[in-house]
Image: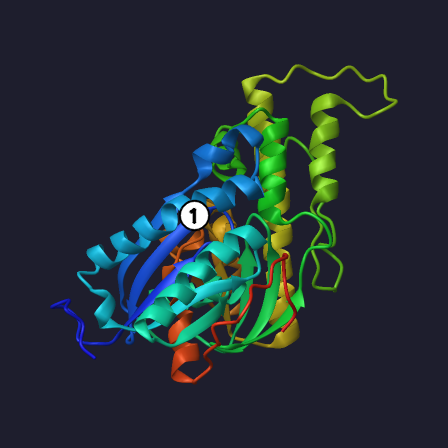
Amino acid sequence: MTSVNPDCDAPLLLAIESSCDETAAAVVTQNRTVLSNVVASQTELHERFGGVVPEIASRAHVERILPVIDQALGEANAQLSDLAGISVVTEPGLVGSLLVGLTAAKTLAMVLDLPLVAVNHMEAHLYACRLAEGRDVFPAVGFVVSGGHSNLYDCRSAVEYELLGTTIDDAAGEAFDKVAAILGLSYPGGPSIAKAAEQGDATSFSFPRTFLKDNQLRFSFSGLKTAVLYEVNGTPGSHREVPPLTPQRVANIAASFQAAAVDVLVGKCQQAIEQIGRDRLCVGGGVAANHLLRSELQQMAERQGVELLIAPQEYCTDNAAMAGLGWELLERGQTVALDFDVTPGLVRKR
């Protein structure tokens, strides 16, 4: 099968992602070249709620999924007849959102008589590192850090993942969103916290670094979030006068919060490397776009003597190019039937 794209003669895979609030489609060649990667963001729909509203997200996916697929094919200069298969994210995520993407993928697979492959969203975030590098990057320790996830994996291959540890409460990105709301900053919280922190002093407040010295690979950010809440609004039962939330105080709290969160994220990655013995760390997810986190991970990797691969900025947030992982499944014959269903939720152990 030959692509009509003059720059590529490899078969094409249409990848679809709709696990949360981004409607996305991409066209990826068998040699893992991304010809198009279209993302329709829903940030403006959820901003006033301070987080993703599942019903709003699923309705927006219904409206956007076909135009996004059409745009992805157009940007890749491809036709439906050029496709060798359909890849779709089916877990984990919001059930309504996942079903929109799967329904579109099933319909195309049935009409075009193409194989269908089901992709795990977490594994796809890590596969983004392989796409960016243009080479096999496994085995490795994998770290997915995003709005809904703070997960460490032992990645034995591109399709073999073992969950090593996750959060017991809030994910890192969720904590960023909640702290931004406490500080009166905009949604999503990651970028707004990072921007405010640029003018702040990260040593102004000694916020907790939960489980940092604990040898277990687990995370907890609810205590950190609560510490920020008490610093802003005062501790219940305390008669201490709370200072006004001036712009400088906001900046100092943001910087101190960010430093505490990053210390824990980097520390747990180091523990995973030491415990598993891998010489490579792959990082993906929306929070991986944070500049302080990227810098601190690089310094840690250099100290540990391991190779650090962080997904490029455009592959950190949810997108469909990373669902190019479907090629690995397709080449191994790991297709699914048209009665395959989604698996919603936050994380599934492999």
Q: Is residue 298 above or below residue 32?
A: above
On the image, the x and y values in percent for residue 312 come to 38, 56
Going by the picture, which residue comes out furthest to the bottom? 332
Q: Secondary structure at mark 1?
A: helix
Identify which residue is drawn at 61% across, 43% down.
174
- Nearest the eye: 129 or 325: 325
Going by the picture, which residue comes out furthest to the left? 6
- Nearest the eye: 48 or 303: 48
Label 1 belongs to which residue?
Answer: 62
Identify which residue is drawn at 73% across, 22% down.
233
- Nearest the eye: 46 or 322: 46
Identify which residue is drawn at 60% across, 22% down.
249
Compared across the picture, whether 220 is left or right of 257 comes to right
Compared across the picture, whether 263 is left or right of 113 comes to right
Q: Is residue 132 above or below residue 238?
A: below
On the image, the x and y values in percent for residue 304 come to 55, 67
In which quarter of the view is residue 175 placed?
top right
Quadrant of the rendering where the N terminus is positioned: bottom left
On the image, the x and y values in percent for residue 291 come to 45, 46
Q: Is residue 303 visible?
A: no
Identify which residue is drawn at 36% across, 49% down.
39
Q: Is residue 167 above or below residue 28?
A: above
Compared across the picture, whether 320 is left or right of 242 comes to left
Q: Amino acid at mark 1?
A: Val
Going by the picture, which residue comes out furthest to the right? 237
Q: How many marks?
A: 1
Quadrant of the rendering where the C terminus is positioned: bottom right
